[in-house]
Amino acid sequence: GLSPPATTSGAKVWGCRQWHRTQGRLFPPSEAPAVRGVRAGPSPPLRAVGVRGAEAGWHGAVGKGPGAIASAQRWEEPPVLPVPTASLVLASSSAYKRFSELLPKEERENACSARLPESRILTLPELRANPFQHQICRAFSTSEEGDGSMSFEDFLDMLSVFSDTATLDIKSHYAFRIFDFDGDGVLDRKDLEKLVNCLTGDGEESRLSTAEMEQLIQNILEESDIDKDGTINLSEFQHIVSRSPDFTR
Amino acid sequence: RPPAYGVLPRPCRALVLLNPQSGAGRALEDFQAVVQPMLAEADIATTVFVTERPHHAHEKVRDEDLSQWDTLVVMAGDGLLYEVVNGLMERPDWEDALKKPLCILPGGSGNALAASINHYAGNDHVAKKKLLTNCTFILCKGLHTQMDLVSLSTASGKRLFSFLGFGWGFISDVDIDSEKYRRLGNARFTLGTLQCLAKLRVYQGRLSYLPAAPEQDTPPAPRDPPADSLLVPLGQPVPPHWTVVPEEEFVSVYAIYQSHLGTNLLMAPAARLHDGCIHLFYLKAGISRVALLKIFLAMARGTHLDLNCPHLRYVPVRAFRLEPRAAAGIMTVDGEALACEPVQGQIHGRLCPRGRQSLPPTQEPPPPPKQ
């Protein structure tokens, strides 16, 4: 596991970040988050984590609400590297650089406490053409106003989950949460419909007809609903995803 | 010209090439439970050859004495039949070898040919187990006929024979991607399509073709092995009577010579085993995701051309050439991935003009064309 690097001249201490700082019920109890940014138990099954200031503490289970990622987009610049610690610090500083570049000049001094509005985040090349850009922002944003704005830690969270070094497990957990629009823990027809509409975009282009949507959802369920209960649960989802690591890129 | 049909001899000796991994590992079981009893009743004796690795079947049919078999049956996916066809074509006595009827029994993997044959036989569209039964029944009846083959030549000097289709871009991406989902038994084209739709790409290249003229008699091809009389070397420009597609950006190009792209995808409803025609489809860049999805969904019923999507073009051809600008995008032949490079191909209808053509899987005489 990762141990916190030594403090340097009063700068913030960067500790381990919990990648799953969301509703605990979706994650196995053995990976319950530790406190204060320092991992107490065995290391989580991932190789790359973001880092964040220890004194920021544990955000707790931030209700992300419905809204989920379906990342189909590949991050070109994996900003977070696995251990050793030095590269972690380096990588997070590259993310820091990207974050502060998106801020208006006058806010860059205090980037650590600034919040980046969603509109600025969406200018990132990785998100610009991504059909799920809004869901992605909502999923990682800890804004209480639900406006999709992100702090640096949120930003780092996002980049780390989408980096090449995040495991399939992490990616698929987030992807599932993002597809689960109504947050009820399963992907039902309504969620799938929303997913398809995200994928096809909201343009003036005609959407799928009701019959076409029905056919598509029927196909999806046939191809992925193993227990035939009419919904896709997390494990069925992960089963599909495990067949194709590309799925969550 | 009325199609000529042959009948398998009785008793009949069949060599069954079976891939035990097909159908999530159930191919052998299905063979013993479903196929063998039916064949026994039809006086067809079977010897099963279980393949252990890729190219195993290819080598077997290429190197062995096949005179003791009246028919070669492939119980697996299209990929195994692809190996068999290419293995046979590598034999010095390929002309004689091709006289032996071939048969495909859907083993549970990619079964586009089986679905096509089922379609030509006038049967309803059916799923796995029923498709296997239908195809076995067709084998039991023992009628066989000629099948067109397409020979493909690549810039790197490969020469391949194909019976199903050649593709580049989106459709091939989906074909290969949905392969990953096949381990649970069913082709998962929908999931593959959605995944590829999310990262929809455009590929640059030049596409040219020789349109199919109606009622044109294919001149008899010289032997040894069948020469591509319609093609000029890849390094030279295409002949002047060819058409060069003006657009140079594609989402996908697919040349299909059977009716089905997958068990649930009726891509070329008018195709027949020996219609002497390559059905060339291409999707131009600029198509929206919605339009692409609509096409995919309509393909389940074969009505995709009725959508009149301006980005989807279809033209029946006898030969084509595809020159990608870069080695980008997956190319597939009969569902198997190929290196991305310039390729050209032409149809070989009735490979052996004299006497009986050997290629054919057994099939029912087709119903009169519905017009």
Image: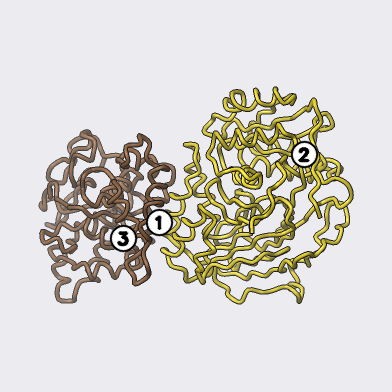
Chain colours: A brown, B yellow
Q: Which residue is mark 1?
A: A212
Q: Which residue is mark 3?
A: A132
The chain under label 3 reads A
Pinpoint residue A105: horizontal percent, then vertical percent. Answer: 18, 76
Q: Earlier in the sequence, mark 3 or mark 1?
A: 3
In the displayed structure, does residue B236 sit left or right of residue B333?
right
The disc placed on residue A178 is: none
Residue B17 lies, with reference to residue B171, above or below; the image says: above
Image-quadrant location for residue B91: top right
SS under mark 1 = helix
In the displayed structure, does residue A215 sit left or right of residue B96?
left
Pinpoint residue A222: horizontal percent, then vertical percent. Answer: 41, 42
Q: Amino acid at mark 1?
A: Glu
Pinpoint residue A34: horizontal percent, then vertical percent. Answer: 16, 40
Give the spatial CA distance, label 3 vs label 2: 52 Å
Q: Residue at x 13, y 42 (%)?
A: A35
Q: Amino acid at mark 3?
A: Phe
Pinpoint residue B84: horizontal percent, then vertical percent. Answer: 72, 40
Q: Quadrant of the C terminus of chain B?
A: bottom right
Q: Are marks 1 and 2 on the same chain?
A: no
SS under mark 2 = loop
Q: Residues within 10 Å of mark 3 (few under 14, many from 20)?
A: many
The chain under label 2 reads B
Q: Residues within 10 Å of mark 2 (few under 14, many from 20)?
A: many
Q: Amino acid at mark 2?
A: Pro
Give the number of the mark in front: 3 or 2: 2
Q: Which residue is mark 2?
A: B101
